[in-house]
Image: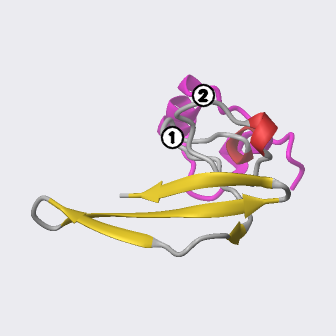
Amino acid sequence: MPLSDSVAVLKGVGPKKQVALNKLGINTIEDLFNFYPFRYDDLAQKKLNEISDQEKITLKGTIASEPTLTHFGRKKSRINFKLLIEHDVVSVSFF
C-alpha cells in the first residue's frame, strides 16, 4: 500500500471518518503518519545551542553533583542536581 494512497483505503475508515480526517488536513496515508496531536511533545535529544527558554527538552549527560531532595508544602518535593553535557554544566530541577 503506497503512502500516497487515500486514507479511505484503510480498514475502519468509512466516508464519515474520511471527511473528519480531511478536515484535519489528512488526505493520504503519509499525511496520517506525519500528523501529530496538538499537545505532542517531541522528546528527541537536542544540543544546548539548539534550545530556547521554557522549552521542554531531552538532554543526555552525566550527573556531576550529588542530587538534593527538597520537600516543601504538603506532598511536594523538588530534586536538583548538576548535569555535565560535553564541557558544559547545567542545573537541572525536577518537581
Specify the quadrant that holds the C terminus.
Answer: bottom left
Compared with 80, 48 (above or below) is above
Q: Quadrant of residue 25?
A: top right
Would you name the residue on which mark 1 appears?
A: 17
Compared with 23, 60 (above or below) is below
As for residue 4 lying within the magenta part, the answer is yes
Q: Quadrant of residue 36?
A: top right
Note whether residue 44 is visible: no
Q: Residue furthest right?
A: 2
Q: Residue at x 69, y 57 (%)?
A: 59
Spot occupied by residue 60 in the image (x, y as percentages of width and height): 73, 63
82 sits left or right of 69 in the view = right
Spot occupied by residue 56 in the image (x, y as percentages of width and height): 56, 44
Q: Residue at x 62, y 48 (%)?
A: 57
Label 2 crowd bin: few (<14), some (14–19), many (20+), radius 10 Å = some
Label 1 crowd bin: few (<14), some (14–19), many (20+), radius 10 Å = few
Would you name the residue on which mark 2 appears?
A: 22
The amino acid beneath tag 1 is Lys
- Closer-to-camera residue (63/1): 63
Q: Residue furthest front?
A: 65
Q: Residue at x 63, y 59 (%)?
A: 11
The amino acid beneath tag 2 is Asn
Q: What whole-number distance in Å separates the C-alpha atoms at marks 1 and 2?
A: 9 Å
Specify the quadrant that holds the N terminus.
Answer: bottom right
Q: Residue furthest left?
A: 74
**In the drawing, what numbered circle is on residue 48?**
none
- Magenta span: 1-30
